[in-house]
Image (spheres, rainbow, N blue to C red):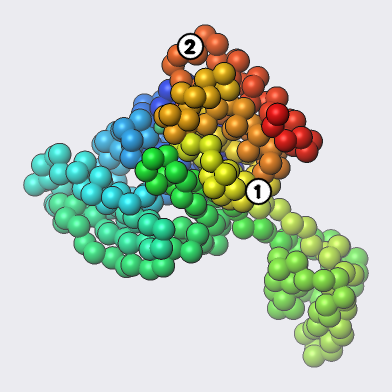
């Protein structure tokens, strides 16, 4: 379970803070100015996903570095082609002769993603942030997959390749002990097989072997045992910035963000300024709303609003929401 919110107001630098509930851990999508975050919030960040390194999406790196240096912290960053050079350029701007003797090690694990490959380089304060080559592997649409969540990514066209992200929590299958007792079933290893079968979405007639300590066992169809389980988690959050509206981008966005609980999507321009939006390789509010609706998202949050609409942000909000509701109900854009 998580809470996710825009770090700044929707007209300011992009950035979404994702706080995982029940764990002192957070993730960031993009890293514009982050002065609005408390240091304690920044110190929770363990994963950072950068769409691209236009200045307004990455200028917060220095502030993050400043807050985290001297702490025992390890942060993973993911970004598009050229990303490691961008990070190295920022690190090269400072003198690091004293940090080697710090007791705590602050380190960065930076993964650069291309259409086919992911290459990781490690930078540790104990070695003065000298690049230490890591692993190279295939990029198959998944950036990270751990016990808690998976992050998928797709490349969008913004005149440069830009990464779009979808973070999905793993499903938790919980055992309701009171129901287990009511059914006179034993605790034990067989519950692991039951949980796996539920997590995989196996059909109801799949037999599950229930074992008692004394060696007795019987086979029960999965469907009958499902009432012992309760599924929690599995929330999905998507982040789309920046992209031109094209059929290729639209298809990738809808596929990546399908059934998101919330989609953060850029909407810099009104549809009446479609020509400007297209020239600048950005979405209009109407296109953003339409895409979020096509993805069947539960909620939409727009950001990256152009400063030209200062005081008129509600127009962008209204346009996006109207298109969102209309495409959710199956209407295509006029
Ligand atoms: Zn941008």
Return the residue nearer the eye: 18 or 71. Answer: 18
- Measuring 46% from the left and 50% from the top, which residue is drawn there? 155
* Residue linked to disc 1: 258
At which x and y percent is residue 19? 52, 41
- Considering the numbered disc 1 on the image, is that residue within a helix, a strand or a loop? loop
Q: Can residue 241 be seen here?
A: no
Task: Work out whether 244 lies above or below 190.
Answer: above
Q: Would you place residue 222 above or below residue 162 in this image?
A: below
Question: Of the numbered discs in the image, which one, if any, rests on residue 278?
Answer: none
Q: Earlier in the sequence, mark 1 or mark 2?
A: 1
Q: For the view shown, which residue lies furthest in the top direction?
A: 311
Q: Position of residue 330 (x, y in %)?
A: 78, 38
Question: Which of the pair 170/158 is nearer the observer?
Answer: 158
**Rendered-image quadrant of the C terminus:** top right
In this view, the residue farthest toward the left is: 97
At horizontal 83% and vertical 77% (from top left) the residue drawn is 206
Which mark is drawn over residue 310?
A: 2
Q: Quadrant of ligand 1?
A: top left
Say what secondary structure mark 2 lies in: loop
The residue lying at 12 percent from left, 45 percent from top is 96
The response on whether ligand 1 sits within 8 Å of label 2 is no
């Amino acid at each position: 379970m998580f809470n996710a919110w825009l770090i700044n107001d929707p007209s300011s630098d992009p950035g979404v803070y994702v706080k995982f509930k029940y764990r002192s851990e957070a993730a960031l999508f993009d890293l514009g100015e982050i002065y609005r975050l408390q240091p304690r919030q920044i110190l929770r960040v363990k994963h950072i996903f950068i769409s691209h390194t236009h200045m307004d999406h990455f200028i917060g790196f220095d502030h993050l570095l400043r807050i985290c240096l001297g702490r025992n912290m390890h942060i993973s960053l993911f970004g598009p082609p050229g990303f490691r050079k961008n990070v190295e350029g920022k690190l090269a701007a400072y003198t690091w002769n004293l940090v080697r003797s710090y007791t705590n090690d602050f380190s960065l694990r930076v993964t650069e993603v291309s259409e086919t490959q992911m290459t990781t380089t490690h930078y540790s304060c104990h070695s003065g942030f000298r690049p230490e080559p890591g692993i190279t592997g295939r990029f198959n649409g998944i950036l990270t997959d751990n016990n808690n969540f998976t992050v998928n990514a797709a490349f969008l066209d913004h005149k440069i390749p830009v990464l779009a992200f979808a973070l999905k929590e793993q499903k938790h299958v919980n055992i309701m002990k009171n129901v287990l007792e009511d059914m006179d079933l034993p605790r034990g290893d067989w519950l692991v097989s039951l949980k796996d079968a539920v997590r995989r979405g196996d059909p109801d007639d799949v037999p599950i072997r229930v074992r008692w300590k004394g060696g007795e066992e019987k086979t029960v169809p999965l469907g009958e045992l499902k009432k012992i389980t309760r599924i929690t988690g599995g929330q999905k959050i998507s982040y789309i910035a920046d992209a031109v509206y094209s059929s290729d981008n639209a298809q990738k966005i809808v596929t990546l963000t399908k059934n998101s609980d919330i989609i953060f999507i850029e909407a810099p321009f009104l549809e009446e300024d479609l020509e400007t939006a297209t020239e600048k390789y950005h979405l209009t509010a109407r296109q953003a709303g339409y895409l979020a609706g096509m993805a069947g998202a539960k909620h939409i949050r727009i950001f990256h609003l152009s400063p030209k609409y200062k005081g008129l942000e509600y127009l962008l909000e209204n346009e996006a929401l109207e298109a969102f509701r209309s495409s959710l109900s199956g209407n295509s854009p006029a």
